[in-house]
Amino acid sequence: MCVVENVVGAALVGSTLVSGSRADEGYYRHQQQMMEQRARTEEQEAARRADSIRSKGEVQQGRSRALLASQGVRVDEGSALDLLLSDEALFEEQAREALYEGRQRAWQYRSQAYGQSLQRRSRSDDSLFGLARGIGSLLGGGR
């Protein structure tokens, strides 16, 4: 009778460990997917912000050109051209900064996603080790 109880007990422990492992794996997989999605969203938002900054820069360039031209200033040479090129470079720098910051946030989310995958693997390995130890104990006479 004792052998039957040990076998049933080991089966219950094994079943619990495996189902717990699956639940943990599902949780960590879900967390990993969420972090990956957040990373993609950050990159998309950064691209939109950069496009918006560039668009505002183009509008500003048009206004500056119109204002200078209305005052009779040639905008394709000299100080006026330098001013326009400087403004253009400033807006491009701001757009690139927005992209950089978005990519940096995306990298942080991807790092968290990688951490979740490591947690998932670790939990899976731990439960399999516990199951193997339980089976070994059963086969070894419960010691």
Image: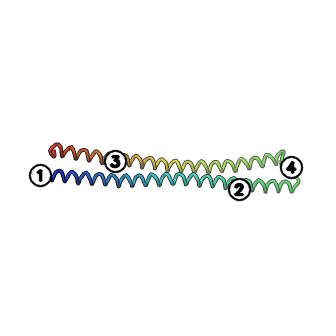
Q: Residue furthest right?
A: 72
> In terms of sequence position, does the residue under pointer 3 or pointer 2 come before the other?
2
Query: Disc 4 versus disc 3: distance between alpha carbons?
Result: 71 Å
> In terms of sequence position, does the residue under pointer 1 or pointer 2 come before the other?
1
Give the crowd class for mark 2: few <14, some 14-19, many >=20 residues within 10 Å: few
- Across and down, in percent, residue 21 comes to 33, 52
> In terms of sequence position, does the residue under pointer 1 or pointer 4 come before the other?
1
> Residue at the location (42% across, 52% down)?
29
Q: Which mark is residue 56?
A: 2
70 sits left or right of 102 in the view: right
Question: Which of the two marks, 3 or 2, is nearer to us in this view?
Answer: 3
Residue that badge 4 annotates: 74
The one of 112 and 1 positioned closer to us in this rendering: 1
- Across and down, in percent, residue 27 comes to 39, 55
- At label 3, the amino acid type is Ser
Query: Disc 1 versus disc 3: distance between alpha carbons?
Result: 30 Å
Residue that badge 1 annotates: 2
- At label 4, the amino acid type is Arg
> In terms of sequence position, does the residue under pointer 4 or pointer 2 come before the other?
2
The one of 82 and 99 positioned closer to us in this rendering: 99
> Residue at the location (19% across, 45% down)?
137
Question: Which of the two marks, 4 or 3, is nearer to us in this view?
Answer: 3
Residue that badge 3 annotates: 124
Label 4 sits on a secondary structure element that is loop
The one of 112 and 139 positioned closer to us in this rendering: 139
